[in-house]
Amino acid sequence: MANFDYKKFDSEAFGSFVARVPSIKIDELKARRAFIGNPEIRSIFRGAANAAYAKIPLYGAITGAAQNYDGITDIIPVNTPSYEFGANVIGRAKAWTERDFTADLTGDDYMDIVARQIAEYWETVDEATLIAILGGIFSLRELDDGEEEGDDNKRVAKSNFIDTHTLDISDKTGEAALVGATTLNTAIQKACGANKGKFTVALLHSVIATNLENLQLLNYMTYVDSKGITRDLSIGSWNGRSVIVSDALPTKTVLDKGTIYTSYILGEGAFFYENIGAKVPYEMYRDPSSNGGSDILYSRQRKVIHPFGFDYIKKEQASLSPEDTDLANPANWELVFDSEENPIDVSLIPIARIISLGC
């Protein structure tokens, strides 16, 4: 236990240990480009230590009909649509005493073991944040009745997003209510049409994943360990898309129907992801009064996890950093609009969901 000692703790070295631990789910989201960086977000929030919220520019794709090049017709330039969205830094902190790690602090590799546990903990925190955000943006229509007159454009845009990006088969009967061989392809085509190929990752509850395994539609990626043994990774593959399994995904029990499951599919650029960093991400402190005296390890993080095409307006947020309940609150979200109050083309948003029964 002497190793868990605030006098000997090197915060920089410990941070390096944590950074080297693979975050399997987050790393896969990055590898499949569902999470991408944003230089504007990085510059604004890393450049100002106290910055927590900012408006970020978002540039649309060039569009419009080509003009006739006949030597007579004038070539008239047009503006590319541009938008901006509000983004909030999500700050989280946690502290542990040596008692939390007692079972593990027994060898020379104690720092590796503690770092692995902490890295895994933060991955579950980020996963919960991601799921809260998805719940918030897919609940936008719940605000329709309370909106003011003149918001028809916003109401139509939100309904359009939710209708086209949701495949709800839970009201069907028999196998038609279950996720099957054609469900994924149908959902992503409904959401983005010819751009369905942008989708790269599916988030599934273990019940849904198990059903797909039983149908031999889902396989798990493998790796060869140091002993030459082939083992399964926790990342699956379904119709060429990576699968992340999580029982934190939404479920709802309905009388006479059973449990309804929500699955999400993300595509390239679905979320902007930036690890902004905390001023002091790791530190240890000696508390002489609690439990006869104990060393406490503190950990902090500041990140931006923001869905493409959405504006975080923090309408009902009490502090600088949003809680997951704030992120799940549809009152804090809007679709982005350009300067002429035209909504973004929702077919450009590579985020979709499937609502189904489990069995």
Image: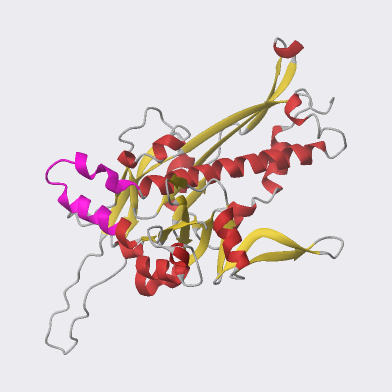
Q: Residue at x 75, y 29 (%)?
A: 9
Residue positioned most to the front: 256
Image-based side of 9 in relation to 205, left or right: right
Q: Where, quadrant-wise, is the N terminus in this rendering? A: top right
Q: Residue at x 35, y 64 (%)?
A: 348
The answer to which of 166 and 211 lies nearer the viewer is 211
Q: Is residue 231 above or below residue 256?
A: below
The answer to which of 340 and 136 lies nearer the viewer is 136
Q: Is residue 154 magenta?
A: yes
Q: Residue at x 58, y 70 (%)?
A: 217
Q: Residue at x 56, y 40 (%)?
A: 125
Instruction: Provide residue 275's location: percent of width, then percent of height.
Output: 54, 45
Image-based side of 280 in relation to 358, left or right: right
The answer to which of 52 and 353 lies nearer the viewer is 353
Image-based side of 323 in relation to 330, left or right: right
- Can residue 247 be seen in this snapshot? yes
Provide the residue span drawn in magenta. 139-161
Instruction: Provide residue 341's location: percent of width, then percent of height.
Output: 18, 53
